[in-house]
Image: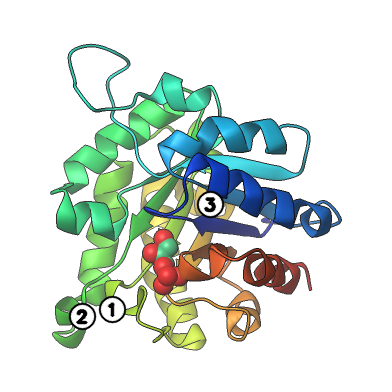
Amino acid sequence: MRIPLVAGNWKLNNTSTQAYKLVVEMIPVLRTIRDVEILVCPPFTALMAVSRLTRDTNIRLGAQNMYWEASGAFTGEISPIMIAEFCQYVILGHSERRAYFGETDNAVNRKVHAALAAGLRPVVCVGETLEENETGRASGVVSRQVREALLGVDLLDIDKLVIAYEPVWAIGTGKAAAPDGVNTLLADIVRGTLRGMFTEAGAQAVRILYGGSVNPENAASFFRQPEIDGALVGGASLKAASFVALVEAAQR
Ligand code: 13P
């Protein structure tokens, strides 16, 4: 049984003061939630403030990126051990990092290894662009991204991994993918690739999330799908009411 995970990726939003206020607003309802894992991923500068609030709650904390080196002359970067001071999770390979910051499959793979070594749970993002989708390349792209991100990962670490399938054309557009189509792609391509790399039992241990224009109105239709183990949410995670509604939808 995979426990559903609802994760908020705040992206480049909220100062530490704003982040603190937002989490204070969410906590009264979120603390009543059972059987759903709740994750918020604020910007680096808000991690310390939010961690003070979430420490003794059922809310997990994640970063949105990290570098793979532990320390050294890498100006502007943040290391796995720095993140592990505050966080249990780290988002890696988000399509915005791939598109705007030149992150490659190989870089994502190095980060996955470094995160696991630091005791962090990676949320590895994969997903095809509109052009790749329209030219029938979604399956090939997604299976390559999964395979390359997880090359060399030990079977013993497999249950720490989360994959987020986020078709780029569905992110921030209000045009979510069709839940049944996502379910098929997750079954055939994402879990299929995992099965080839990590055995059937390994593949079944990995939680797979959907991301891309998830909101309180459409969330239940995703959570009903057997292969969808939760959601990675951008816009709708920035308001307490909508994030709480998504978590409640996952609980049902
Ligand atoms: P939206 O929910 O705003 O479409 O963003 C999805 C996303 O990129 C989460 O990582």
Residue pointed to by mark 2:
130
Tell me the kind of residue under disc 3.
Answer: Val
Q: Nearer the viewer, residue 230 or 141?
A: 230
Tell me the kind of residue under disc 2.
Answer: Leu
- State the residue at coordinates (58%, 85%): 218
Question: Does residue 86 appear left or right of residue 70 in this picture?
Answer: right
Quadrant of the frame with the C terminus: bottom right
- State the residue at coordinates (35%, 26%): 114
Q: Nearer the viewer, residue 79 or 163?
A: 79
Q: Which mark is residue 240?
A: none
Residue pointed to by mark 1:
169
Question: Does residue 186 appear left or right of residue 249 in this picture?
Answer: left
Question: Does residue 142 appear left or right of residue 222 in this picture?
Answer: left
Residue projecting furthest to the right:
32
Q: Quadrant of residue 106?
A: top left
Instruction: For ligand 1, give the image quadrant.
Output: bottom left
Give the answer, above or below, for where 3 lies relative to 184: above
